[in-house]
Amino acid sequence: MSILKSVKIVSADRKAVPSPTFSKRHRLLVRIDELLALAEASRDGKNFRPEHTRTYVDPATGNKEQRLVEKRLQKWWWVASNAKVYVELRYGSRPIELTPGKTAIELDSESQVIDTLALLKQAVLAGELDKQLAAAGMTWRAALRPKT
């Protein structure tokens, strides 16, 4: 019992589910980190293909096995016909409105993408996009509801 007396024992409740705001922020931050790695690899002329684990069931034996598969990654920036680069944030497959009616950030060159993604990451960490994420979550949820 003397070992247990050397540590501080408290009663603590662990929240099972994080807040929806935290979950949405975290999901967006993970995606921005992947895009930053993709942009840096693209700048350096390298290939970036993140992997994740998938579980497959062998039809012959019925055993489950986990395999590493490449994640499909879509860039959130593109070069338009006017030679400008546009970056947009997405919640799932839908763009997030940064200001009412506007979803993209215009850049002069593709070399600014990394700095812009880093700025967007700071904005998400600071909670500046919480209202937009909540609105995007509501439109996503409304699309899943059965239409009556």
Image (cartoon, grey):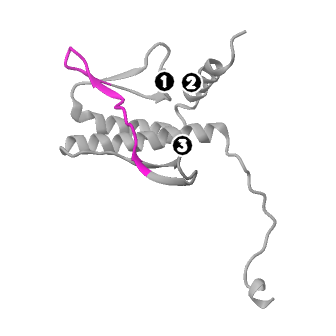
Residue 93: horizontal and vertical position, in percent? 47, 25
The answer to whether residue 57 is seen in the rendering is no
Q: Residue at x 40, y 47 (%)?
A: 69
Residue situated in front as seen by the camera: 107 or 28: 28
Q: Amino acid at mark 3?
A: His
Q: CA distance from mark 3 to mark 2?
A: 15 Å
Classify mark 1: helix, strand or loop. loop
Residue situated in front as seen by the camera: 120 or 139: 139
Classify mark 2: helix, strand or loop. helix
Disc number at residue 26? 3
Q: Residue at x 48, y 20 (%)?
A: 97
Badge 1: how crowded within 10 Å, few (<14), some, or many (20+)?
many
Quadrant, the N terminus: bottom right
Classify mark 3: helix, strand or loop. helix
Q: Amino acid at mark 2?
A: Ala
Q: Which residue does the numbered mark 1 point to in the structure image? A: 96
Q: Quadrant of residue 86?
A: top left
Residue 42 falls inside the magenta stretch: no
Quadrant, the C terminus: top right
Q: CA distance from mark 3 to mark 1?
A: 15 Å
Q: Quadrant of residue 12?
A: bottom right
Q: Residue at x 68, y 19 (%)?
A: 145
Residue 133: horizontal and vertical position, in percent? 56, 29
Residue 29: horizontal and vertical position, in percent? 47, 42
Q: Which residue does the numbered mark 2 point to in the structure image? A: 136
Magenta span: 68-86
